[in-house]
Image: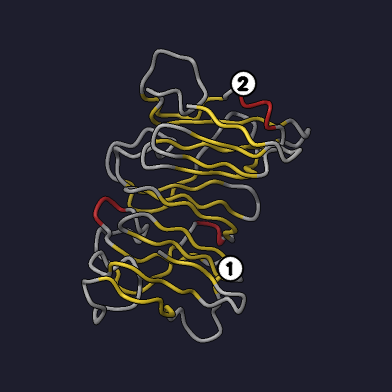
Amino acid sequence: CGGTSTAGYLITWGAAGSVAIGRGAGASSHAVAAGRVELGDGIFASAVAASKLHTLIVDSDGGLYSCGLGVGGRLGHGDQKAAVVPRAVRLSGGVRVREVAAGLDHSLALTTCGELWTWGAQTAPLGYEATADQLLPRRVKFQADRSTRALCAATSDRHCLVCTHDSRGAVACYGWGANEQLQLGLRVPEAWIALPRRVESLSVLGSGRSLACGGGHSAGVGADGAVFSWG
């Protein structure tokens, strides 16, 4: 597990065997108490996300870091090596990150300008057709309109959801990945959807404030604060 303090320190705790707690090779493989992760002098955390095998960290300047097991490319470092302490993840163009989400074998990053980037195992819900494991961040494209920007996003191990808006102010929700339990909100015969597909039923969210993805279900908070769930 992990969290940030009011001072911007990153605190982790739990099983250290996967090196996802980011506190170095000296950490015990058994459960460990809460402790601070060193990000570097003058670097403070503003957001964090974790899955079973890795952790993602955003600093106060929009920089992105990851640590944990690198098999399948979930860390976004361009290789599949483990990282026992946080290492920087580079997004092309020098964009800044404001929000992250972690699935078992993949990762998501939402930038301050509304771009959504994903990376990880070929079999994970990446939002594009991958012919091999994606070892570096790659931008997800929602439609032909290049003005589309992501407002919020969420992922489980097997599906992703995102709320977007375009230059005209039109809001839309998209989903991809597993849908065998209707967790995407799509009543379609496909059990797996590789590319982002607009989910008309989620128009009730408006410019959604928040999304969450579980194993076979999803939830969202609408613009008016109402909570919806499906799956």
Q: Where does residue 98 sit, x and y in percent of width and height?
A: 60, 58
Q: Residue furthest bottom?
A: 41
Amino acid type assigned to the residue bearing label 1 in the image: Ser
Taking depth in this image into account, of 101 and 90 the one nearest to the observer is 101
Could you say which disc has been placed on residue 200 in the image?
2
Amino acid type assigned to the residue bearing label 2 in the image: Glu
**Residue drawn at x 57%, y 25% as measured from the top left:** 198
Horizontal relation, residue 217 to residue 80: left or right: right
Above or below for 133 versus 84: above
Could you say which disc has been placed on residue 183 in the image?
none
**Residue drawn at x 27%, y 61% as measured from the top left:** 69
Q: Where does residue 166 sit, x and y in percent of width and height?
A: 71, 35
**Residue drawn at x 34%, y 74% as measured from the top left:** 85
Q: Marks 1 and 2: CB-CB under 8 Å?
A: no
Report which residue position mark 1 lands on: 46
Q: Where does residue 212 sit, x and y in percent of width and height?
A: 52, 42
